Amino acid sequence: MSTTLQDILTVEAAAVGLTEFGISPPVIDPAAVCALDRWRAAGFFGGMEWMADTGRRRTEPFSLYPAGRSIIVFVVPYFWPDAPTPNLRISRYARSRDYHHLVTAKLERLLQRLRAQVPNLDGRIAVDTAPLLERPLAVQAGLGWLGKNSCFIHPRFGSWIFLGELMINQKLPFSEPGGESHCGDCTLCLEACPTGALVAPGVLDARRCLSYLTIEHRGIIPPAFKGHLDGALFGCDRCQEVCPFNHRAAATPLPDFRPLKEITELTADHLAAMSGHAFRRALGQTPLARTRLAGLLRNLVALQAEEGAAILSPTTLKKILNRSELARRQHEAFLASPTPQTRD
């Protein structure tokens, strides 16, 4: 019996630690494109201007890789059940090395192995940063469905997963598409959101999302959110923590995602005392680098306004305000804000 490309892919993907994958055609479901257009039109992207790009790259994979004939979509789980709880509230995905580096490295090794075995095979890798609608592609690849919390949900690993794509110039048998939601009547995620960012099932207004506000947002956190930060220093997992599929999610088999002590043992005082060089040395290869030290100091100051001196001593707060103009503006904005407003 001759060995097929599918057989080679299965073996070589497992060799680099990628065992969960499906195959999608290099087109995006028109319904997903329409949903993106509605989301953009509503302005739900906030300051993420790259998401407002109405060009065809994000919705037409051929424009990203014209030679593509198949898109292999990989589910990469990161749930580490026995990890210590961090001193500071840091999203679960951000407690190890930056997944962009880890997943990209695995896909690069896989592409090298495939090139060595399959004549004329070539491809392009995408891990989150490329303009590709990866969640609809994961549905098309039969790997799961889009949850009401707007996350992609895998039946075994829940939403504690990353996605990575390998677009190749050869045809593979396409997987049977998924898409049927198993969320049923459950609305736990919508009810759990501290800021009401889930404005409808599966629809996220990033402007209200704590993950956006504490990670991607570059200005001060608007005073309207004073009292609703829910202890979040970096990201928010509330809508995932309540999901029944995550309560029974399988642990990752990948040691790459073991939480780092530099993150789980990080304290407010330690972070506040870091120089830019010390921050880059300790946390520069982790997702926390995305927010930069200035953004994290802003977040600490915002939390201080909600939770009092238990977060920062008066001396530490003063040092932060003296060194960071952004933190100072955040402090002034929250100080002038009235009693925390009720959620809409």
Image: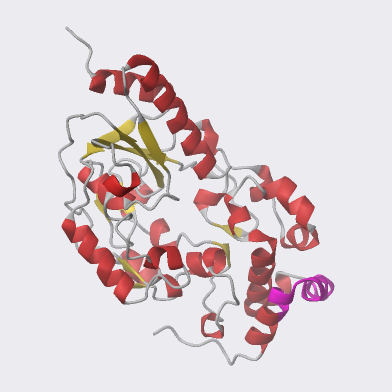
For image coordinates 36% across by 21% down, the residue present is 114
* Location of residue 280 in the rendering, given as x and y in whole percent from the top left corner: 72, 50
Answer whether residue 141 is visible to the viewer in this image.
Answer: yes
Q: Position of residue 163 (x, y in %)?
A: 38, 44
Q: Is residue 128 left or right of residue 94?
A: left
In the image, residue 334 lies at what x, y percent?
63, 84
**How many circles with numbers are drawn on the protein?**
0
Residue under the image location 69 percent in, 46 percent down = 262
Up/down of 308 relative to 2, above or below: below
Q: Which residues are magenta?
A: 313-328
Q: Is residue 321 magenta?
A: yes
Residue 51 picture quarter: bottom left
Q: For the C terminus, which image quadrant? A: bottom left
Q: Is residue 16 visible?
A: no
- Decide if residue 39 is on the left or right side of residue 265: left
User: Looking at the picture, how far across and down is residue 11, in whole percent?
Assistant: 33, 19
Which image quadrant: the N terminus?
top left
Q: Quadrant location of residue 207?
A: bottom left
Q: Tell me: 122 left or right of 279.
A: left
Foreground residue among 28 and 161: 28
- Display colour scheme: secondary structure
Above/below status of 324 relative to 289: below
What secondary structure is the stretch in magenta mostly built from? helix
Q: Would you say residue 166 sits in the magenta stretch?
A: no
Lateral position of residue 285 relative to residue 7, left or right: right
| Residue at 34% across, 64% down | 189
Please give the name of the residue rendered at 33% of the width and 54% of the height, measured from the top-left corner: 57
